[in-house]
């Protein structure tokens, strides 16, 4: 089939996940989103999506700016008002909350979040093209071209790669990626609880991994167990009742008895560093640009701040600058670098620290938790950072 040209957009986004759609909604330019997956169903199923995100105050502010937050069903969102963290000695703990009872974060389902952002993006003029697979891309100072599977060529001044941790765009652009596989696998599931979580998120740093309990509305909660070694296989092989008991006991029965309320999913955990995220005519955002350990729950928030900052940088460009100019894209890259590097350093070192064996290592990290818990200024800083 001979190549034909599609209507040219100012910006083409490859990847129709939450972050790519959020950028499309935030951008003041004409945007076309190319998504390889199928169109979103007419309605989301009633059971809770197995994927949930902890959205920071900064992310909520961004979602409100683009008109997405008001589209999310309030009865499917849980506010996190307090964080409790436990060491592996049964005594050490750290808890903190922001002043005035303000939420630290909001737990939202991935499918309903993406739907709300997509609706906002369409309302703000973005074109969404699901079921669109790409054959190749070419980017340069003059702009970008994406050749679709059917031979159609989609041209733009800028191509934004938002196609996830295994980014095809990143590979096509030849951007280096340093990936490290963590020794844990994330085991994710939802449970009904004998007692409601009342907005408290809990995290246990255990010798066999890191276990997080995230509040969901009503009597539900979601877990992310970053399980070391063969533990992930062991947990996934348990029957529902045995798994519920295992999770209950690992959390000291903080919410009473549990009952499995979803499928059980597993996800590999990786640290992904991309030294350069921009070339003339193209830039990466979200998981395509970086990956962090989920122990701080900040991966998706980093992605949303990528989208927000890139949209602002493009909106503030001079009349002589095109969206794909490398100098403009490098300014965005530098603006995001410190935030991304800091989060990667903190989460990577915490994962290493709590993975150390031996009594001295255990005593040191548990003492660290107790020291932070006794310092009110340190807890205020933790709360402020979580809300960014």
Image: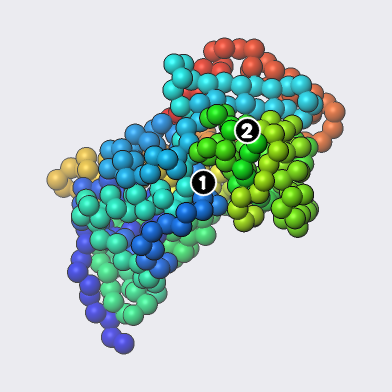
* Residue that lies at the very extreme toward the left in this rendered image: 319
Q: Choose mark 1 or mark 2, whichever is in front.
A: 2
Disc 1 + disc 2, Cβ < 8 Å: no
Q: Mark 1 vs mark 2: which is more N-terminal?
A: 1
Instruction: Say if residue 110 shows up in the picture.
Output: yes
50 or 127, nearer to the observer: 50
Residue count near mark 1 (Cα–Cα under 10 Å), binned few <14, some 14–19, many ≥20: many
The residue that mark 1 highlights is 52
Q: Residue lying farthest front?
A: 194
Q: Residue at x 16, y 47 (%)?
A: 320
Residue at 57%, 12% in the rendered image: 376
Q: Quadrant of residue 40?
A: bottom left
Residue linked to disc 2: 195
Badge 2 marks a residue whose secondary structure is loop
Q: What is the image's colouring?
A: rainbow
Residue 13 relative to residue 193: left or right = left
Give the residue at the far bottom of this rendering. 1
Give residue 45's position: percent from left, percent from top: 46, 57
**Residue 335 rendering spot, x and y as whole percentages:** 38, 37
Tell me how far mark 1 sits from mark 2, CA to CA: 20 Å
For the point 72% across and 42% down, the residue is: 247
The quadrant of the rendering that contains the C terminus is top left
Q: Is residue 326 left or right of residue 94?
A: left
Quarter the N terminus occupies: bottom left
Viewer-closest of 352 and 241: 241
In this picture, is 76 found above or below 98? below
- Residue at 68% x, 41% y: name it: 258
* Residue 202 coordinates in the image, percent (x, y): 62, 31
Q: x%, y% of residue 339?
A: 46, 35
């Amino acid at each position: 089939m001979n190549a034909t040209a599609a209507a040219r957009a100012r910006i083409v986004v490859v990847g129709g996940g939450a972050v790519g759609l959020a950028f499309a909604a935030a951008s003041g330019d004409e945007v076309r989103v190319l998504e390889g997956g199928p169109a979103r169903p007419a309605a989301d199923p009633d059971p809770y999506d197995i994927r949930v995100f902890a959205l920071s105050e900064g992310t909520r502010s961004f979602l409100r700016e683009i008109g997405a937050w008001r589209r999310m069903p309030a009865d499917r969102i849980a506010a996190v008002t307090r964080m409790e963290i436990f060491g592996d000695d049964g005594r050490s703990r750290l808890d903190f909350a922001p002043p005035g009872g303000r939420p630290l974060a909001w737990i939202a389902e991935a499918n309903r979040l993406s739907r709300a952002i997509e609706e906002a993006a369409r309302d703000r003029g973005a074109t969404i093209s699901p079921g669109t697979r790409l054959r190749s891309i070419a980017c340069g100072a003059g702009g970008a071209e994406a050749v679709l599977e059917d031979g159609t060529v989609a041209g733009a001044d800028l191509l934004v790669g938002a196609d996830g941790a295994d980014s095809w765009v990143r590979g096509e652009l030849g951007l280096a990626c340093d990936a490290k596989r963590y020794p844990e696998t994330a085991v994710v599931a939802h449970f009904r609880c004998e007692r409601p979580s009342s907005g408290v998120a809990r995290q246990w740093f255990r010798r066999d991994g890191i276990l997080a309990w995230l509040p969901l509305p009503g009597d539900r909660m979601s877990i992310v167990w970053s399980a070391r070694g063969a533990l992930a296989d062991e947990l996934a092989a348990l029957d529902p009742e045995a798994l519920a008991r295992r999770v209950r006991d690992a959390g000291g029965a903080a919410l009473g008895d549990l009952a499995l309320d979803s499928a059980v999913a597993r996800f590999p955990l990786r640290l992904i560093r991309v030294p350069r995220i921009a070339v003339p005519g193209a830039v990466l955002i979200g998981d395509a640009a970086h990956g962090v350990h989920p122990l701080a729950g900040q991966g998706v928030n980093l992605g949303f701040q990528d989208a927000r900052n890139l949209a602002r940088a493009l909106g503030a460009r001079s009349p002589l600058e095109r969206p794909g100019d490398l100098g403009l894209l490098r300014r965005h890259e530098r603006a995001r670098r410190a935030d991304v590097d800091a989060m990667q350093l903190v989460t990577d070192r915490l994962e290493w620290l709590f993975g150390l064996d031996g009594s001295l290592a255990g005593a040191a990290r548990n003492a660290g938790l107790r020291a932070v818990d006794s310092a009110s200024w340190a807890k205020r800083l933790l709360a402020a950072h979580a809300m960014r």
